[in-house]
């Protein structure tokens, strides 16, 4: 299906609901342009932050004349400068994501579109990229709601990536990323280098949130007694005898894996959210991500 | 005990195990990634044709199923004793007497109940054939082990109005018993009546005798006779009381639907009373006699008679003169008798033709004409061959053999005291049948139809016998005349017995006839409907009636002048002493027709209690278990439908 054929992600009503949300940024960031977020830099906003002694060259307009009248000392008023942040949204586009009912990649595109729109609506810079084949392919960072259509078109484009190479792709993106802010990774993390990838992304100055997207039958597998499981990404096959024992061991391993990822992300101040691909998008945004304080 | 040959099937068990050890071709199942699965798999083995046998519930269930199926195929059984064999032929009597019904007894309902009981007593794995028997046998279900089907068939059995005859049913049972030596014939009957079939049954016969009452009276005979001149119509009614107590019944006579006579008759136990009713208008065409009030069997409480038109037939007696014969023939109201010797025969015939008043019946006493007559003829003591057959030597002092009691020619005729000095040895031609024979098989009295003309034959000189001195003689002559000149309304005789069929001539332009039964819709078993019969070559075969009452034949034709004409009418009556005597009979007579074993009580039959069916049920249950094990995805999705969906680690989904 081509981008033009693809149905629009959201209707007008849903977009209006989205505008009530914004992406949370727990770290105060230093942006380039004045935006709607507080910056660690002291600037010219109306929000008072601190005083410091006057030194030659300071802007005389920032002198606190009232303090001078009382104390006969010159103080310069410092304000929290409101600056923009960059929202990074990374979508795993490997073949393993092109699987499941509902399709994981489709669910990831929709989640990315919604989160990207949140950023655009908050006048944040939004950078969206697909990870796949060991590299990242993104679009130039954009700002403002009027760029939403461009964002949606980019996300709707068909992908041809086969292998993830998740760690390499994450490293590539991290190396050329500009601006800091929330970094949202939407992936099934089914790649041997998933921890390296997370490490690479967590090493940036961004606040990492991982949306771990799995299909329902990856959470509750149904395996025939004599089956040959064929990997959608690599074509590699595994022969199994699908008895109850095997399925129980799979469940246990899955839980262990999810806990490992959650712990890894949490230790690095990030958020880990498990997202079944059949989870309703509105539930994801207005319930799950809100509880996890990814949006507010 | 089992059939050990079937245990060869146990070879299936190692074959199943071998299949489990073989590396089977697996079904490809696409998954998003095998990333997690690879960490779990212990049994990714080399591509060897065999693998180590591991415990599997599926294997266990399949081995169990195979073992049970093999065991079931071996037909395990235990030897038991039952009064029923594995193959049962159940004969339910549906003759008229089974319609006996009083306040305390519904004989047919009792019969159905006993029949159902027989079905329930069938040995395990037993088969049953259900036969409803009246005058013929009607197989309702054949050699089935489906007891529900057998009981359903039994529930649909009703009594008929037909006289009983177990010949067909016993012949059928014999055939079935020949096919399976382990057979029992069970007859559910009231055993009423004297007549039993002459066939034997090659299997033990058990009788479920039902019925207690004998309180029944019946109209045993009804005939309407015109007196000479035709101005008066006499009705002869005989009423029998086969029960063991005296009864008083009111006899009502209806002429064309109007009550014309009613009288009380006192009927001594086991006796028969006769009444002559002379109050019937001579113009009446349909007469009905009824016994008013209830009794055990109402089928025989009504009788009908169709009064023939007032017609006389010119009859010519050819011979040297026989006073007894002339007297007997002169008494018959339908005959206008003339006599002549042998020499004047040809002229008399020619004169009659010339006058336009030909003879309708010729009686040859000791004479056989050269040319066969073209009208019905009765031959007495023929001296030479004739259309009836050939004549041989004289037989001295012939003994009359036993006669058929149902033979219409011998109705009310008792020949047991008749002696004959000499008779002719006769050989009958095709179309003739002997009614009375010598003990050596030579015909003494015969009737038949040759070249389209009815013929009667008495093979001895009346002067050489004491028959003319007995009351049987005028009755015999009357019956012979009735057969040679059947009185009737149109194409049908005035009366017929139940089940009696007749072939009659009709206008060849008529394509079909419609045969309708009317008159007694309120009698038991009155289920027949009218039927159409095709006319072939100007003749039509009217099938036997199965209902007491009136029968009417009407034409069906596209030609308006031939359409819907009444071609004939006849009365159908039960008139069966066996059926009217509803007292339950002795079952031993029927039991003795089968294979009898020593002792008074019916011997218990060794039979098999087969146990394949619980094994088959167990195999079926295990198959269901196997399906559940095998089709785990379905089972799981069912279970999930009743379970709450899993929640993501990030919080509640909803």
Image (cartoon, rainbow, N blue to C red):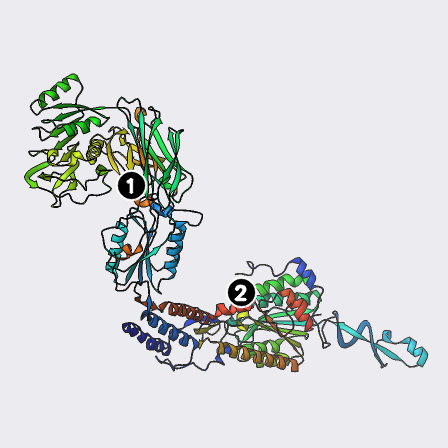
Instruction: Tell me if I can see residue B287 in this picture.
Output: yes
Rendering coords of residue B306 (x, y %): 31, 30
Quadrant of the image occupied by residue A147: bottom right
Residue at the image position 25 percent from the left and 64 percent from the top: B598
Q: Is disc 2 placed on a helix, strand or loop?
A: loop
Left-right relation of A78 to B497 = right
| Disc 2 packing (10 Å; few <14; some 14–19; many ≥20) | few
Residue ID for mark 1: B499
Residue at the image position 53 percent from the left and 61 percent from the top: A2
Rendering coords of residue B185 (x, y %): 30, 58
Quadrant of the image occupied by residue B225: top left
Left-right relation of B355 to A284 = left
Q: Which mark is residue B583?
A: none
Chain to which mark 2 belongs: A
Residue found at the far top of this picture: B355
Quarter of the figure with the C terminus of chain B: bottom right
Q: Nearer the viewer, residue B244 or B597?
A: B244
Q: Is residue A20 above or below residue B59?
A: above
Rendering coords of residue B130 (x, y %): 33, 54
Instruction: Tell me if I can see residue B552 in this picture.
Output: no
Q: Which mark is residue A158?
A: 2
Q: Is disc 1 placed on a helix, strand or loop?
A: loop
Quarter of the figure with the N terminus of chain B: bottom left
Q: Is residue B325 above or below residue B1?
A: above
Left-right relation of A49 to B160 = right
Rendering coords of residue A113 (x, y %): 62, 65
Q: Nearer the viewer, residue B237 or B137?
A: B237
Chain to which mark 1 belongs: B
Q: Nearer the viewer, residue B445 or A257?
A: B445
Q: Is residue A267 above or below residue B304?
A: below
> How many angstroms separate mark 2 from mark 1 (CA)?
90 Å
């Amino acid at each position: 299906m081509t981008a033009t054929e693809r149905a629009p992600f959201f209707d007008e009503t849903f977009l209006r609901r989205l505008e009530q949300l914004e992406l949370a940024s727990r770290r105060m960031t230093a942006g380039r342009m004045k935006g709607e977020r507080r910056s660690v830099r002291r600037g010219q906003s109306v929000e008072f932050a601190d005083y410091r002694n006057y030194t030659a060259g300071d802007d005389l307009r920032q002198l606190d004349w009232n303090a001078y009248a009382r104390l006969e000392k010159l103080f310069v008023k410092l304000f929290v400068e409101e600056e923009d942040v960059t929202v990074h949204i990374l979508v795993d586009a490997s073949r393993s994501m092109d699987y499941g009912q509902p399709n994981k990649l489709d669910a990831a595109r929709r989640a990315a579109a919604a989160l990207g729109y949140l950023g655009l609506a908050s006048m944040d810079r939004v950078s969206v990229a697909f990870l796949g084949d060991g590299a990242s392919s993104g679009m130039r960072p954009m700002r403002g709601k009027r760029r939403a259509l461009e964002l949606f078109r980019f996300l709707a484009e068909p992908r041809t990536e086969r292998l993830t190479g998740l760690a390499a792709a994450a490293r590539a993106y991290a190396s050329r990323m500009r601006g800091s802010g929330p970094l949202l990774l939407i992936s099934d993390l089914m790649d041997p280098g998933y921890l390296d990838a997370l490490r690479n992304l967590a090493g940036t100055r961004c606040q990492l949130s991982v949306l771990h997207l799995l299909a329902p039958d990856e959470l509750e597998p149904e395996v025939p007694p004599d089956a040959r499981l064929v990997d959608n990404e690599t074509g590699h096959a595994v022969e199994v005898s699908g008895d109850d024992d095997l399925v129980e061991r799979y469940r246990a391993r899955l839980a262990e894996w999810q806990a490992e990822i959650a712990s890894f992300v949490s230790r690095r101040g990030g958020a880990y959210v498990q997202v079944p691909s059949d989870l309703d998008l509105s539930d994801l945004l207005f319930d799950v991500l809100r509880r996890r304080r990814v949006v507010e | 005990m089992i059939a050990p040959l079937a245990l060869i099937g146990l070879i299936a068990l190692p074959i199943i195990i071998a299949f489990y050890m073989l590396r089977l071709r697996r079904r490809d199942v696409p998954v998003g990634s095998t990333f997690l699965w690879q960490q779990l798999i212990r049994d990714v083995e080399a591509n060897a044709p065999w693998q180590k046998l591991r415990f599997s519930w599926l294997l266990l269930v399949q081995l169990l199923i195979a073992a049970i199926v093999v065991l079931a195929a071996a037909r395990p059984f235990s030897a038991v004793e039952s009064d029923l064999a594995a193959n049962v032929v159940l004969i339910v009597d549906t003759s008229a007497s089974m319609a006996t019904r009083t306040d305390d007894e519904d004989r047919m309902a009792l019969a159905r109940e006993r029949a159902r009981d027989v079905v329930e007593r069938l040995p395990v794995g037993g088969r049953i054939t259900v036969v409803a028997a009246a005058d013929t046998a009607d197989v309702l279900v054949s050699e089935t082990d489906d007891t529900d089907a057998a009981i359903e068939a039994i529930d649909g059995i009703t009594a008929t109005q037909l006289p009983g005859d177990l010949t067909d049913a016993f012949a059928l049972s014999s055939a079935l018993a020949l096919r399976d030596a382990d057979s029992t014939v069970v007859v559910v009957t009231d055993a009423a009546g004297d007549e039993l079939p002459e066939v034997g049954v090659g299997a033990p016969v058990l009788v479920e005798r039902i019925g207690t009452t004998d309180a029944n009276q019946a109209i045993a005979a009804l005939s309407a006779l015109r007196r000479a001149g035709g101005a008066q119509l006499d009705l002869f009614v005989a009423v029998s009381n086969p029960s063991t107590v005296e009864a008083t019944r009111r006899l009502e006579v209806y002429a064309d639907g109007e009550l014309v006579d009613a009288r009380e008759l006192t009927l001594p136990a086991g006796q028969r009373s006769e009444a002559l009713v002379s109050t019937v208008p001579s113009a009446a065409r349909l007469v009905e006699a009824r016994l008013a009030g209830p009794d055990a069997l109402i089928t025989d409480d009504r009788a009908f008679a169709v009064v023939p038109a007032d017609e006389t037939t010119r009859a010519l007696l050819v011979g040297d003169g026989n006073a007894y014969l002339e007297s007997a023939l002169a008494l018959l109201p339908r005959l206008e008798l003339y006599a002549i010797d042998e020499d004047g025969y040809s002229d008399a015939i020619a004169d009659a033709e010339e006058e336009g008043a030909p003879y309708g019946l010729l009686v040859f006493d000791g004479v056989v004409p050269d040319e066969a007559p073209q009208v019905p003829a009765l031959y007495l003591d023929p001296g030479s061959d004739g259309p009836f057959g050939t004549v041989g030597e004289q037989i001295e002092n012939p003994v009359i053999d036993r006669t058929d009691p149902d033979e219409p020619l011998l109705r009310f005729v008792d020949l047991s005291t008749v002696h004959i000095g000499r008779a002719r040895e006769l050989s009958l031609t095709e179309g003739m049948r002997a009614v009375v024979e010598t003990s050596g098989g030579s015909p003494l009295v015969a009737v038949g139809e040759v070249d389209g003309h009815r013929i009667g034959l008495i093979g001895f000189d009346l002067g050489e016998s004491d028959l003319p001195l007995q009351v049987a003689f005028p009755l015999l002559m009357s019956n012979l005349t009735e057969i040679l000149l059947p009185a009737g309304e149109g194409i049908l005789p005035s009366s017929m017995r139940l089940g009696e069929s007749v072939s009659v001539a009709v206008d060849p332009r008529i394509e079909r006839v419609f045969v309708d039964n009317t008159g007694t819709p309120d009698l038991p078993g009155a289920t027949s409907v009218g039927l159409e019969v095709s006319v072939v070559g100007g003749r039509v075969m009217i099938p036997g009636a199965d209902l007491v009452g009136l029968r009417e034949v009407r034409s069906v034709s596209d030609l308006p002048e031939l359409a819907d004409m009444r071609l004939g009418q006849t009365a159908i009556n039960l008139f069966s002493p066996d059926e009217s005597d509803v007292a339950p009979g002795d079952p031993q007579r029927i039991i003795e027709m089968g294979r009898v074993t020593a002792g008074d009580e019916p011997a218990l039959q060794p039979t098999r209690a087969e146990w394949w069916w619980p094994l088959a049920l167990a195999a079926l249950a295990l198959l269901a278990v196997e399906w559940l094990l095998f089709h785990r995805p379905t089972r799981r999705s069912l279970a999930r439908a009743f379970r709450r969906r899993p929640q993501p680690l990030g919080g509640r989904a909803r």
